[in-house]
Image: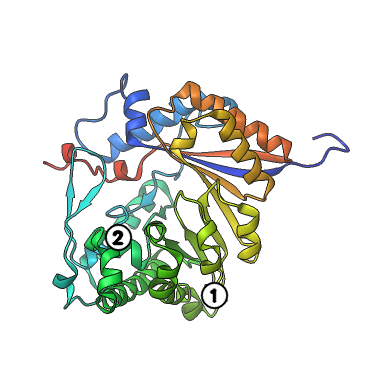
């Protein structure tokens, strides 16, 4: 920057690729490991960092000489999004696609379900050991344990029937929500003790998007409001929430979320009315998610939506779940568009790629799990 120029304000842009993206654009030349191991995971991590640099280095993505420096590889995680469902008895299976596949229960089968304290459970013991292991390997580590929300976890326990149950059996659903909430509270306290203070309280509210705002306010919001007070009750701070609303427009839920006691940030589609959301939610941070569908559609429309979102005050972009159709050539074009739009608004994009998929870090595929 020379004298007289207006300083550029950074705009974080996270990049996350689907396993199938890596299969098509990386593993055709470098096959996946035949057996799971930490060494294999490290090789995967370093190789992908180099590949990202080769493809997108002009935006400082990846590393020319990759090193193990306690980055994404030094992450404690367990069961993907399903730590709470597992604590509450849900069995997870592995398939021929990456990820975990829960065996659902009916609501009637859960009548005697009781909250579980992870601090007194083998899962908690495993997480402590894993943190110690990663600390010893990399000098430090973080975690990606999904605290979730009552709706997200209920969906992973009951399946899509939870939506009909919310209308037909609301009292039974409330009992399930209460059990989930108490288990989440204990998980929050455990994570707070083991990994350090969490404030704001994170929410994963993906499945809220499949109901209307009225049903959400009536049945779910009271539980979300209690979850939002986890840190306040433990540390005496002002209640604050960080909500992941998933890759859908936030607009129908702005008034409902405004009733939560303090909202620090929200993450939703970049096609949301960002300015309206920030006004309606007290100026909270807005993380704008760019969908795979948008990446693979008309690039002029993508640029127009990015232009509006950034002009309206987006605080960061989340380009997640990049699928195989968005190959390196197309993605270079898209990154150029992001760069150009940011520059128009005095923003400097800071690209933050994730070279590993969370499922891969747990080898969550039948081929690695003896299936």
**Mark 1 closeness class: few <14, some 14–19, many ≥20 residues within 10 Å:** some
Please, is residue 338 above or below residue 140 in the view?
Answer: above
| Front residue of this view, candidates 69 and 9 | 9
Q: Is residue 114 left or right of residue 229?
A: left
Mark 2 highlights which residue?
127
- How far across and down, in percent of the image, does residue 106 sit? 16, 66
Quadrant where the N terminus sits is top right
Residue 26 in view in this figure: no
Q: Residue furthest top?
A: 29
**In the displayed structure image, the side of residue 315 where residue 176 appears, left or right:** left
Residue linked to disc 1: 261
Q: Is 112 left, or right, of 54 in this rendering?
A: left
Picture coordinates of residue 278 (x, y %)?
Answer: 63, 59
For the point 27% across and 46% down, the residue is 362
Whether 289 is drawn above or below 331: the answer is below
SS class, disc 2: helix
Q: Residue at x 25, y 74 (%)?
A: 169
Where residue 233 appears, x then y in whole percent?
47, 80
Q: Nearer the viewer, residue 232 or 158?
A: 158
Inter-mark Cα distance, 1 to 2: 31 Å
């Amino acid at each position: 920057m020379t004298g007289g120029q207006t300083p550029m304000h950074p705009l974080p842009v996270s990049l996350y690729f689907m396993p199938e993206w890596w299969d098509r654009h990386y593993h055709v030349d470098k096959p996946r490991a035949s057996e799971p191991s930490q060494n294999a995971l490290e090789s995967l991590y370093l190789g992908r960092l180099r590949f990202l640099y080769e493809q997108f280095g002009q935006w400082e993505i990846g590393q020319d000489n990759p090193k193990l420096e306690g980055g994404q590889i030094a992450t404690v995680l367990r069961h993907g999004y399903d730590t709470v469902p597992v604590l509450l008895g849900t069995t997870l299976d592995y398939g021929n696609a990456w990820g975990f596949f829960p065996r659902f229960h009916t609501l009637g089968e859960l009548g005697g379900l009781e909250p579980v304290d992870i601090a007194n459970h083998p899962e908690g013991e495993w997480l402590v050991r894993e943190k110690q292991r990663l600390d010893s390997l990399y000098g430090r580590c973080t975690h990606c344990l999904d605290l979730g929300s009552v709706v997200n976890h209920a969906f992973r326990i009951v399946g899509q029937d939870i939506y009909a149950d919310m209308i037909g059996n609301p009292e039974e659903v409330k009992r399930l929500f209460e059990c989930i909430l108490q288990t989440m509270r204990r998980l929050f306290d455990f994570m707070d003790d083991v990994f350090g203070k969490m404030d704001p309280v994170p929410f994963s509210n993906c499945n809220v998007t499949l109901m209307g705002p009225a049903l959400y306010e009536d049945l779910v919001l009271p539980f979300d409001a209690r979850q939002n007070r986890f840190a306040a009750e433990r540390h005496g701070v002002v209640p604050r929430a960080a909500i992941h609303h998933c890759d859908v427009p936030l607009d129908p839920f702005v008034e409902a979320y405004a009733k939560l006691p303090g909202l620090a940030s929200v993450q939703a589609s970049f096609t949301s009315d960002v300015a309206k959301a920030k006004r309606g939610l007290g100026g909270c941070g807005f993380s704008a998610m760019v969908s795979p569908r948008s990446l693979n559609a008309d690039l002029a429309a993508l640029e127009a939506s990015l232009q509006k979102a950034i002009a309206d005050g987006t605080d960061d972009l989340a380009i997640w779940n990049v699928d195989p159709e968005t190959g390196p050539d197309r993605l270079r074009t898209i990154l150029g568009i992001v760069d150009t739009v940011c520059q128009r608004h005095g923003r400097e994009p800071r690209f933050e790629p994730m070279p590993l998929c969370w499922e891969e870090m747990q080898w969550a595929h039948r081929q690695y799990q003896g299936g």
